[in-house]
Image (spheres, helix red, strand yellow):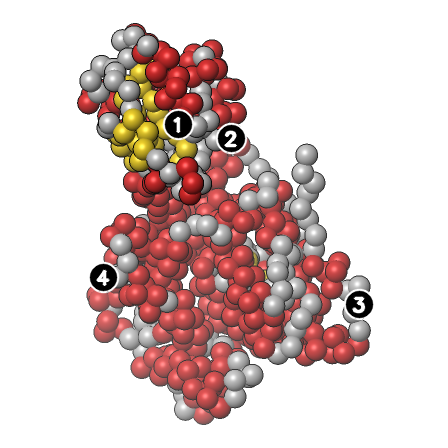
Amino acid sequence: MKTLDFKPKMASAIRNYDRKTFMADLMAGIIVGIVALPLAIAFGIASGVSPEKGIITAIVAGFMISTFGGSKVQIGGPTGAFIIIVYGIIQQYGMQGLTIATLMAGVFLILLGVLRLGTIIKYIPYPIVVGFTSGIAITIFTTQIKDLLGMTMDENPADFIEKWIAYGRNISNIDLWSTLMGLLSILIITLMPRVNKKIPGSLVAIIVVTIVALLLKNYAGISTIETIGDRFSISSQLPGATVPELTWDTIKGLAGPAMTIAILGAIESLLSATVADGVIGDHHNSNTELIGQGLANIASPIFGGIPATGAIARTMTNINNGGRTPIAGIVHAVVLLLIFLFLMPLAQYIPMACLAGVLVVVSYGMSGWRSFLAMLKNPKSDVTVLVLTFLLTIIFDLTIAIEVGIICACLLFMRRMSETSDVRAIYDEIDLNEDADMEAGNLEHLTIPEHVEVYEINGPYFFGAGNRAEEMMTRFGKHPKVRIIRMRKVPFIDSTGLHNLENLCLMSQKEDIQIVLSGVNEKVEAVLMKNGFEKLLGRENICNHIDLALARAREIVG
C-alpha cells in the first residue's frame, strides 16, 4: 500500500537555512506583499465581496500554501480565474453558499492529493485551459466596464449578453472624470515596467490615482468619482473563525461549483508551480501542492475569505526578487496582515475606476489571445474544444464550460485512440520481413494453410478496435475452420475488448470455427487467463508466436 505523498517543501527548505537566504526571502516577501495588496482588493470586490475579504484570503491562504505546499516559491491568494465562479455562487447561494462551496473544494483538493492525482491534473487538454482562461478574461473585462466608465445603471444583469445590452442602454450615463481615472490607471500600469520593473505598476496607479481623485474632490469640487468607501464600509478588524452549518441539500446543490473551484485551483496552482520549476531549476511535489491548496481553501472561508490558488504573476515576482524558500510566502502574508491592521482604512479613498483599470490590465494578461489565435490553426477537434469551452464560459458559466469541455475532449481522445488501432486480414502468406522482432537470419515467408484465416490487430484492443475486429471477421470471412488472430502489436486490452473477443470466440464456436491467438504479450495474456479464456479456447490455442499458431492451425485442419 502506497504511503501518503505529503512532503511540504518547508520541511526541506529550513534544514540548511542561513541568514543570507533569509534576507533574500525577506525582501522578496515584502515586495510580493505590496504587489499583492491592490490585486487582493480588486479581486475581492470583483468577486462580489468586500475588499477586506480579498486581503484576508491572501493572508490566510498565502500562509497555508507556503507552509504546507509542494513548491518552494509558490505564492497563493485570490486570483482572477475565480472571479466569475465566486460571483455566480454569491448571486445564487449567498455568502454562506460560497463559504460551504470553498470548504468542499478544499476537501476535494486534499482528496486529489491523497489519491495521487496531482500528475493527472496536468493532462487536462491545453485547448480547454486556453478556452476557459480566455473566456474568464473576456468576462472579467465585461464586468469592469461599469466601474471603468463610472456608469450609473438601474440594472446590472449577471448574464454576459444582457450586460452588454444594459451598457448600450446606459451609454449616456458615463462619468467623464471616472473614465479619466480608469484610463490613467491603465496608462500607469502599462508604462511602469519601462520606468522600473521592480515597482508594481498597479500599486503606483492606485497611489497616484487616489491622490489625484482626492485633489479633484477637495480643490476642484469633483464629487462624481466613486470610491471604495462610497460602496463599502471598510473594517480592519480580524474576523473570528466560524464554521457554517452544513446540510445535505446544500452540499448536493454546491457539489458542482465546488468541484469547479477545485479543478480550477488545481490547474492554476500546478501550472504556476511548473512554470516556477523551470525558472529556479527545482521540482515541485504535485500531490503535496494539492493537499496544501486544499488546506488553504478550508482555512480561508473559515476566517471569512474566498477561494485561493497559486498565482503565477505573484510567484514570478517572488522569484525575480530573490525568493527561494516558502519563508518568502509567509513574509508576504505577514506584510499583508500588517497593512490590513494599520492601513486598511485608507483603502476607502481608492476610486472604483482605478481598481477597474487594474482588472482590465489583468484580464488582458489572462486572455492569452496570441495562444488562442495560434490554436485556431490546429486540428478541427482541438479548435472545436477551444471555441466551445470559450463560448460556454462567457455565455453560460465556468462550471458548464469545464464539464462540457472535458467531456468533449475525452470523446475526441477516445475517437483518436480508436483510429490508432486497426485490423487487417492477411491472405495466402505472411511476410516475416515486416516483423521487426524477427532476427535477420530468420527472414522468410510463411504460407497460410487452406481453410485458415489470419487477422492482425495493430494497437490497443479496446471498444473501438474490438467492434471493428468482430465486424470484419464475421462479415467478410469465408467460413474457415480456423481463425488466427495475431495480437503481437496489442499493448493492452480493456473490458470492452475482452467482451468483444469473447463474443467473437463464442460466435465462432457456434459455426465450428476455432479461434487461435498468436503473439500475445505477457500482460495481455495475464488478463485473458484471469478472465477465463484458457477454458474458453484451450491453453494450446493461445500461442506466443505465429509459427506455433500456424502449426496449431494445421493440426486442427488436418
Q: Quadrant of residue 375?
A: bottom left
> Alpha-carbon distance for marks 3 and 2?
46 Å
Q: Is residue 353 left or right of residue 300?
A: left
Task: Answer whether residue 556 is visible to the viewer in this image.
Answer: yes
Q: Earlier in the sequence, mark 1 or mark 4?
A: 4
Q: Determine which residue is flagged by label 2.
A: 523
Task: Answer whether residue 507 is visible to the viewer in this image.
Answer: no
Q: Position of residue 326 (x, y in %)?
A: 68, 65
Near mark 2 (Cα within 10 A), the count class, few <14, some 14-19 or many ≥20, is few
Residue under the point 30% across and 65% down:
374
Q: Determine which residue is flagged by label 1.
A: 546
Q: Earlier in the sequence, mark 2 or mark 4?
A: 4
Q: Earlier in the sequence, mark 4 or mark 3?
A: 3
**Relative to 414, does residue 524 appear above or below in the rendering?**
above
Please give the label number shown on residue 165: 4
Q: Quadrant of residue 458?
A: top left
Assign a secondary structure to mark 3.
loop
Please give the label number shown on residue 16: 3
**Relative to 61, does residue 3 appear above or below in the rendering?**
above
Looking at the picture, which amino acid does disc 4 mark?
Ile
Which is closer to the viewer, label 4 or label 3?
3
